[in-house]
Amino acid sequence: MFRQKGIVIALSALMTLLIVLSVLAIRLHLSRIEPDDHKGYKGYAHAKSGQIEPSDEKTLSGDIINGVRVVKMKARQFEFEPNQIVVNTGEKVRLEITSEDVTHGFELDEFDIERQLPPDKTVSIDFTAKKAGKHTFYCSVFCGHGHDEMQGELIILPADK
Ligand SMILES: [Cu+2]
């Protein structure tokens, strides 16, 4: 009788321990997910500007027209097409972006660019690709559930390429 009581107490202690441990595990898991707090303004995570990797695309985008590299792009839920733009250092660049559905935005922090892209209009965005590097551009207007993933990258190749 006494021994059975002992087993019952030991079992309940074990159960309590298990419950406490799983609560701790869930807490830990949640705190791992939360670094979303580092999101930039308008709710998406801003990636850092990066180095150009050997695996990056080296095919230049668009065509040179009157000394300007003109790149036609489309914006739609939830992507830019193309989502990778490759230019040379020092080039004047003009992105001609047409939204095919709703209002999107084009944000390229490196060049202080933030423009609205109303539906069915072509917006020209001009800048000079000053120095080599890789920069992420984003949709800056909330456009639906996939908005946070609507981004692409601008690769500015080093001058010696
Ligand atoms: Cu968007």
Image (cartoon, rainbow, N blue to C red):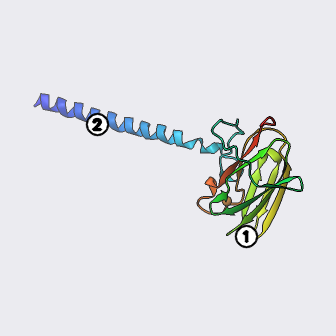
Which kind of residue does numbered mark 1 sit on? Answer: Pro
Image quadrant holding the N terminus, namely top left
Q: Is residue 1 above or below residue 118?
A: above
Residue at label 2? 15
| Left or right: residue 136 compared with residue 32 | right
Which residue is drawn at the image coordinates 70% and 39% (left, top)?
48
Q: What quarter of the picture does the C terminus occupy? A: top right
- Name the residue at the left extreme: 1
Q: Which residue is mark 1?
A: 119
Q: Is mark 1 within 8 Å of ligand 1?
A: no
Q: Nearer the viewer, residue 117 or 33?
A: 117
Up the image or down, 102 lies above or below 10; here it is below
Q: Position of residue 103 (x, y in %)?
A: 72, 66
Q: Disc 1 on helix, strand or loop?
A: loop
Question: In the rendered structure, which amino acid carries the disc numbered 2?
Answer: Met
Ligand 1 lies in quarter: bottom right
Q: Which of pointers 1 and 2 lies earlier in the amino acid sequence?
A: 2
In space, the residues marked 1 and 2 are separated at their CA atoms by 59 Å
Residue at position x 78%, y 66% from top?
122
Residues 8 and 42: in front is 42
